Image: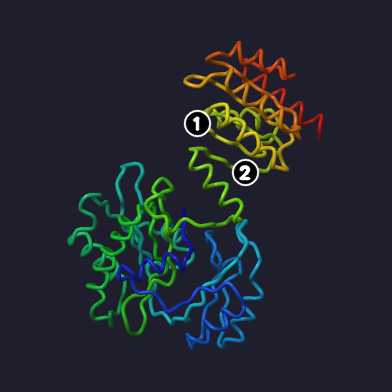
């Protein structure tokens, strides 16, 4: 779960990480008022979870509230990385003397957090660091200890060594405290990534987080309910996603024609590959984990509402659940609704003979082979297209 910039900066402020003065707004009048209150030249920053807003020409500058409101009208409602811009951060424009990059993320290879720092802050920091790896410092951290005093000193030393001349008398101490604060955010919010880019030095005052990025582990959302809200999705999509999470389901919309209802992420990915290799495209997939009669009935209604689904491919590999119960869930759906798509079923496992008999009576002939079922689904797509 990636937070919006304004949310990340609110968290930073609570943990003594300095940020520019700013206000979040979702209307032209709100932007005007925010700029008026800040009483300074401002930056208008669209709030999306997709990066590279500046390169896309979406970050604007304004000297007056009127100009700020005009900038808002020019970018509001546009899309960036598939996201519709619904709000902006109105932030005071800051004159910088030097920019750094600072982050805490997860080193999945070694299963530890890692502190990252570079004196090459800015939009091209990844490319710059790749071209000059000595300008990126990595310090592995202990999850139990966090950033130790020695590690904080080491990172501050590295950053200050590339800041010359050094008129900022307290910079070394400020960077030490900043690295520790950044880790406290990382730990407190169960983060996968906490990033400041750029971290700016100004002519006066402490280093400022001009941009802020926080990504929280999806599995820990229940620990941070105040941050669970729609991002890069409509209210309807968000409500549906929350319902899926309560059930332990994973639903992913795609751009093809074949809907997939299956149990288990591994087999679902294999189905996606089979469809692709045989010239088809998936419209979406629902990974359902364990499912019962009512569950499969509810799952069918989800696909029923999907306009892109031209064929529904159902993979049933029953273990603890039973094929006959799942087959009854499908016939319950067919009793209550007229399916807007052909239904292709692959069924195997516990009580599969009984399940097949139930489906055949309803006019659906299940396949024991996944490859056969995929081929049939692609054939059906071609027939209805």
Q: Hey, which quadrant is residue 29 in on the image?
A: bottom right
Disc sitting over residue 289 in the figure = 1
Q: What is the x, y in percent for residue 284?
A: 63, 39
Q: Is tag 2's residue or tag 1's residue first in the polypeptide sequence?
A: 2
Compared to 356, does 180 lie above or below? below
Q: Secondary structure at mark 2?
A: strand
Cα gap from disc 2 to disc 1, whole angstroms: 18 Å
Task: Kindly identify the residue that appears in the image at 43 percent across and 82 percent down.
Answer: 95
Task: Kindly identify the residue that appears in the image at 36 percent across and 67 percent down.
Answer: 12
Q: How is the image coloured?
A: rainbow
Task: Kindly identify the residue that appears in the image at 21 percent across and 65 percent down.
Answer: 153
Q: Secondary structure at mark 1?
A: loop
Q: Which of 231 and 340 lies nearest the eye of the viewer?
A: 340
Disc sitting over residue 253 in the figure = 2
* Mark 2 closeness class: few <14, some 14–19, many ≥20 residues within 10 Å: few
Disc sitting over residue 308 in the figure = none
Q: Nearer the viewer, mark 2 or mark 1?
A: 1
Compared to 371, does 147 lie above or below? below
Task: Kindly identify the residue that appears in the image at 76 percent across and 26 percent down.
Answer: 379
In this rendering, would 125 be left or right of 152?
right
């Amino acid at each position: 779960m990636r937070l919006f910039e304004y949310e990340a900066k609110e968290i930073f402020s609570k943990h003594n990480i300095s940020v520019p003065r700013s206000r979040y707004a979702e209307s032209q009048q709100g932007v005007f008022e925010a700029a008026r209150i800040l009483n300074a030249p401002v930056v208008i920053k669209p709030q999306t979870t997709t990066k590279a807003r500046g390169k896309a020409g979406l970050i604007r500058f304004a000297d007056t509230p009127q100009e700020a409101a005009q900038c808002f009208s020019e970018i509001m409602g546009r899309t960036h990385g598939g996201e519709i811009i619904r709000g902006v951060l109105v932030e005071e424009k800051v004159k910088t003397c030097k920019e750094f990059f600072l982050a805490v993320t997860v080193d999945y290879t070694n299963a530890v957090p890692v502190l990252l720092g570079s004196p090459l802050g800015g939009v091209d920091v990844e490319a710059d660091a790749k071209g000059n790896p000595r300008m990126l410092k990595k310090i592995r951290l202990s999850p139990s200890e966090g950033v130790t005093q020695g590690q904080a000193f080491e990172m501050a030393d590295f950053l200050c060594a590339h800041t010359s001349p050094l008129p900022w008398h307290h910079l070394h101490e400020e960077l030490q405290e900043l690295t520790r604060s950044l880790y406290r955010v990382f730990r407190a919010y169960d983060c996968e990534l906490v990033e400041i880019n750029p971290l700016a030095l100004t002519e006066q005052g402490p280093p400022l987080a001009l941009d802020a990025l926080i990504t929280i582990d999806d599995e820990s959302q229940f620990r941070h309910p105040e941050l669970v809200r729609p991002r890069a999705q409509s209210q309807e999509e968000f409500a549906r996603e929350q319902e899926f999470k309560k059930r332990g389901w994973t639903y992913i919309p795609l751009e093809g024609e074949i809907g997939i209802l299956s149990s288990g992420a591994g087999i679902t990915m294999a189905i996606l590959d089979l469809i692709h290799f045989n010239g088809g495209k998936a419209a979406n997939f629902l990974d359902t984990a364990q499912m019962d009669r009512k569950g499969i009935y509810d799952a069918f209604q989800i696909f029923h509402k999907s306009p892109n689904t031209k064929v529904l491919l159902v993979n049933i590999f029953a273990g603890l659940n039973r094929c006959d119960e799942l087959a009854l869930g499908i016939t319950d759906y067919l009793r209550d609704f007229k399916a807007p798509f052909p239904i292709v079923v692959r069924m195997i496992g516990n009580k599969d003979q009984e399940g097949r008999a139930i489906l055949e009576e309803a006019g659906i002939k299940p396949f024991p082979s996944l490859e056969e079922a995929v081929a049939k689904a692609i054939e059906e797509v071609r027939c209805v297209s």
